[in-house]
Amino acid sequence: MRKTSYWLSAALLISPAAAWSQEEVEIKVQQLTEHVYMLEGRGGNIGLSIGDDGVFMIDDQYAPLTPAILEAIGNLTDQPVKFVLNTHWHGDHTGGNENLGNAGAIIFAHDKVRKRMSTEQFRKLIGGRTPPAADAALPTVTFNDRISFFMNDDEIQVFHVAPAHTDTDSLVYFASADVLHMGDVFFNKRFPFIDVDLGGSIDGTIHAVNLALEMTTGETRIIPGHGPLASRQDLKDYRDILLTVRNSVAELIAQESTLEQVLAAQLTESLNETWNWNFINGDRLVELIYADLAKDPQPGTEVDSE
Ligand SMILES: [Zn+2]
């Protein structure tokens, strides 16, 4: 029972309906380059390109925060939000879609973001149902692989990676600014949630992170879906702990260990102090990886680090 109620409260965090008051939330603005900004509030980190061509916005947190987010943007520019790009379908990244669409923004996302948002979604492990979003919240332009935006002296390259955190993820690279927004493929200094019930995969996540490591340098600024602004080294640390935990779980599955036995092995003990947070702790991550790999016909297959 304890486990079920834990996951149910976790499911609330990624649903668009927020269980807190917006007055508690402060929108923190960080300027990264002449045109690119990172905004933190509650829910997924927001990326912005601001300039004469208008505002390009990555993710929009929860609906009650839209006025505060638009006020923060209004302090930086007189330009309207022209385009919104959803990195994936979770409600803590798409909750503001309806408000921003009504304010005139065009919403872009991968085909599967629209598909998952437009129908009821059910998670077996977490045990929660996500109802379909309102029509006005759905992305109006979708793509199946990649799309680029040429604005504010930059080429903003968006490309789909899947399966990863979900089966709907995109990474967004600002080529001139050398800033990469990774959505929830990257949780900086936090154990990740991997939505294994709805298309996510640990091996796919590691694969997508390796791809991001290949396309970045020590100079690249990386905006994670959750957690503080990151460097390539932070991303590498994250890849390394994912690989360690993944391979330890796979090894025990190969020995036909039950979930209870895998949890009892305390595989994340040395990592918990740095990576635990209120949503996902070491045990929850192990549970997700176990659920994912136990359905693999060849558990124990090692994933290379590069
Ligand atoms: Zn997410």
Image (cartoon, grey):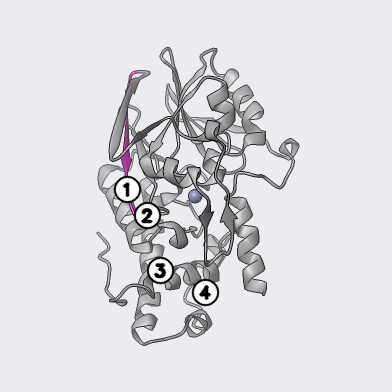
Q: Mark 4 vs mark 3: which is more N-terminal?
A: 4
Q: Is residue 107 left or right of residue 61?
A: left
Decide which of 161, 132 is in the foreground and name it. Answer: 132
| CA distance separating discs 2 and 1 | 7 Å
What residue did someone put label 3 on?
292
- Indicate which disc, 4 or 1, sits on the residue closer to the N terminus: 1
Q: Secondary structure beneath disc 1?
A: loop
Identify the mark at residue 164; answer none if there is no mark.
2
For mark 4, what is the residue? 269
State whether residue 153 is above or below residue 99.
above
Q: Amino acid at mark 3?
A: Asp
Return the residue nearer the eye: 194 or 97: 97
Q: Which residue bears the numbered disc 1?
A: 161
Residue 159 in picture, x, y percent from top left: 31, 39
Asked which secondary structure carries label 3, the reply is: helix
Q: Are marks 1 and 3 in contact (CB under 8 Å)?
A: no
Give the alpha-carbon distance from disc 1 to disc 3, as whole Å. 18 Å
Q: Indicate whether 155 appears above or below 264.
A: above
